[in-house]
Image (cartoon, rainbow, N blue to C red):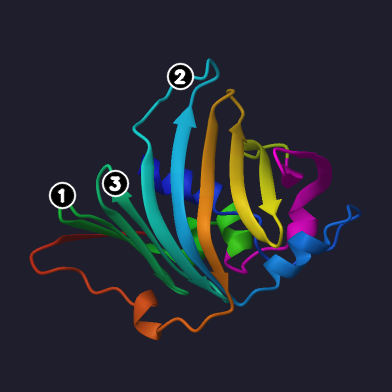
């Protein structure tokens, strides 16, 4: 569950956008119909101490609402959404959790990423000064009851390299991206999930 929640709040800020900031780089990327790449992830508390082991994996998404997000290390977890249902498979437990996709990622960065939300309606966007060669954008949720303080998105050239989610309690989750490719054909089977033989399947309403 923790990996799922981190994922939902770390994959965001990737859909259509209209904002006051000079965000042409962000706009162009968010107009992509498909994106794939690899990532590394680290979460720390407000003192900067790691709260879990660093993780790595790969991702693919295709509008509207389809994605395949795989944590490969330190343990394997697969998240697949076909646009209607979200499947989460924990390999070690051989357990599959099935959720309604619309209900699983409401008004989160993930819902923006997968074309289910309006960025300029739900987020305030500011372009920050460049840092470490990255063009930075800060997204702050407009809703007062949001469970995330802000999202920082960093680009090098036309592709994203950094996504940082700052939580309300000072915790910070950082994803770094590599080998990002846009608008390439992705086989439909990537977004289809069949529970492995013998897996426990739990449907969550």
Q: Position of residue 8 (x, y in %)?
A: 50, 51
Contact (CB < 8 A) between labels 3 and 2? Answer: no
Q: Earlier in the sequence, mark 3 or mark 2?
A: 2
Please give the label number shown on residue 73.
3
Magenta stretch in the rendered image: 114-143
- Picture layout, residue 125 above or below residue 119: above
- Which residue is pictured at 36% across the width and 42% down the height? 55
- Which residue is pictured at 45% across the width and 36% down the height? 42
The crowding category of the residue bearing disc 1, from other C-alpha atoms within 10 Å (few below 14, some 14 to 19, many at least 20), is few
Quick one: 44 or 56, which is closer to the camera?
A: 56
Tag 2's secondary structure? loop
The crowding category of the residue bearing disc 2, from other C-alpha atoms within 10 Å (few below 14, some 14 to 19, many at least 20), is few
- Which residue is pictured at 77% across the width and 65% down the height? 27
Left or right relative to 3: residue 183 = right
The crowding category of the residue bearing disc 3, from other C-alpha atoms within 10 Å (few below 14, some 14 to 19, many at least 20), is few
- Picture layout, residue 152 above or below residue 36: above
Identify the image quadrant of residue 64: bottom right
- Which residue is pictured at 56% across the width and 57% down the height? 110
Q: Which residue is mark 2?
A: 49
Contact (CB < 8 A) between labels 3 and 1? Answer: no
Q: Which residue is mark 1?
A: 93
Tag 1's secondary structure? loop
Q: Position of residue 9 (x, y in %)?
A: 54, 46
Left or right relative to 11: residue 199 = left
Left or right relative to 115: residue 194 = left
Q: CA distance from mark 3 to mark 1?
A: 15 Å
Q: Residue furthest top?
A: 47
């Amino acid at each position: 569950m923790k990996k799922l929640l981190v994922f939902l709040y770390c994959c965001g800020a990737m859909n259509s956008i209209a904002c006051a900031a000079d965000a042409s780089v962000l706009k162009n990327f968010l107009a992509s119909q498909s994106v794939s790449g690899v990532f590394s992830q680290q979460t720390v508390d407000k003192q900067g101490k790691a709260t879990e082991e660093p993780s790595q994996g790969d991702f693919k998404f295709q509008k509207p609402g389809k994605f395949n997000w795989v944590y490969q290390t330190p343990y394997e977890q697969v998240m697949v959404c076909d646009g209607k249902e979200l499947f989460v498979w924990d390999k070690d437990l051989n357990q599959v959790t099935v959720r309604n996709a619309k209900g699983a990622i409401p008004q989160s960065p993930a819902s923006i990423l997968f074309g289910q939300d309006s960025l300029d309606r739900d987020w305030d966007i500011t372009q920050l000064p460049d840092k470490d060669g990255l063009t930075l954008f800060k997204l702050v949720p407009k809703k007062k009851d949001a469970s995330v303080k802000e999202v920082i998105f960093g680009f090098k050239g036309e592709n994203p390299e950094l996504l940082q989610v700052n939580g309300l309690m000072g915790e910070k989750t950082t994803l770094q991206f590599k080998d990002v490719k846009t608008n390439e054909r992705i086989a439909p089977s990537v977004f289809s999930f069949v529970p492995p033989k013998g897996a426990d399947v739990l449907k969550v309403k």
